[in-house]
Image (cartoon, rainbow, N blue to C red):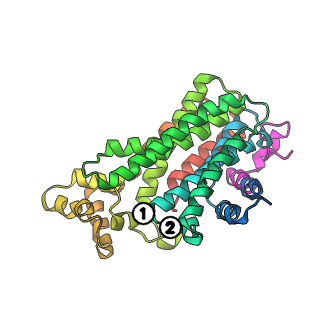
Amino acid sequence: MSPLADPNSPMASSTQSVSSDERVAALRARIDEALPAVVDGRSPASLYDAVEHVLRAGGKRVRPVLLLLVAQSYGTSVDRALPAALAVEVFHNFTLVHDDLMDEDDERRGGATVHAKWNPGTAILAGDLMMGLSYDLLGQVEGTDAEALYAVYHPMVERLCAGQALDASFETDDAVTVEAYLDMIDRKTGALLSAAFELGSVIGGAPSPERDRLGTAGRLVGRAFQIQDDLLDLTADDEAWGRGVGGDLVQGKKTFLTLRALERAEGAEHDWFARLVTDGGLPRDDVPEARERMADLGIFEEAREAVHTYTEKAHDHLHLLPETAAAETLHWLLDRLQARGH
């Protein structure tokens, strides 16, 4: 087994020559290689081709990598933790398939979404199947009580679905607060990230108090991750972002930035931003002016500070991990996530 596969092995001394960047890249490659095999050779093609299309579409693989790094920090090999890592990634992609359908988005990761390439019925079935596959994968983890894993997984599913429902309800709610938005993030985005941290600790054999703290770290990472997404929607490079900058403003989405702008702006300034709610979004031509107004209000600075604060709080919870190369990489990855440009 290579040092990348197990940084806590007797070969651990050689991991000093392996950078965190290389370690994460190796884990992502392992996940990318294993995902399509989840449905390889299954039929009917009308269903499984759609699932394979999603699993081959790429992505950051943040959740499975985080799970693997936590498990490795406790001395667990990638081989043993990999089924759980695949489970959370398959589940994450299930949520994207249904999310795209609910939002009527026709493109994801530079390719057609399932309902656009096939039809809405196939998207529903493919998502349902992927959710079931994730449960099956989680049960394949060897050397760990499956009930302990499902005790983390079941509540996650409920919280995430509740978060998705809250997010949808915000579209017609004119009185959404930043606090309500953060609560929604804790469910829709934070639930699966929290579960990834906690599942890695369960597989690694961590004591219960440490599992709870790692779950909290995942929730904090979820807040930082989503607010960074909100920020990038207005500040990213168009080509790197992969979709038009300012799309949230055009669609009238309630994000950390738009809600803080509505809370902070006064008088005519508030009326200008209120069109996000009253008109269901801003004209595309108004996006540059919205960026300038938000910058003048200090919204971007506040969002960046929030991302930094939540990331630092997550780091604080991760200091309980054994001092290993995997734990060091985990800290490195959190810093990269808050500095990402897409």
Relative horizontal placement of residue 34, taking residue 236 as reference (left or right): right
The answer to whether 208 is drawn above or below residue 167 in the figure is above
Query: As shown in the figure, which amino acid type bears the numbered disc 2?
Result: Trp
Residue visible at 74% across and 40% down? 81
Query: From mark 1 to mark 2, how far is it between C-alphas?
Result: 8 Å
The x and y percentages for residue 310 are: 45, 42
The x and y percentages for residue 61 are: 63, 54
Query: As shown in the figure, which amino acid type bears the numbered disc 1?
Result: Asp
Disc 2: CA contacts within 10 A as few (<14), some (14-19) or many (>=20): some
Callout 1 secondary element? helix
Residue toward you, 179 or 296? 179
Q: Which residue is mark 2?
A: 241
Callout 2 secondary element? helix
Magenta-colored span: 1-29
Relative horizontal placement of residue 93, taking residue 4 as reference (left or right): left
Asked if residue 255 shows in the view, the reply is: yes
Residue 233 marker: 1
Query: Is disc 1 in contact with disc 2, using a CB cutoff of under 8 Å?
Result: yes
Q: Quadrant of residue 194?
A: top right
**Count of marks, rendered view:** 2
The x and y percentages for residue 202 are: 67, 31
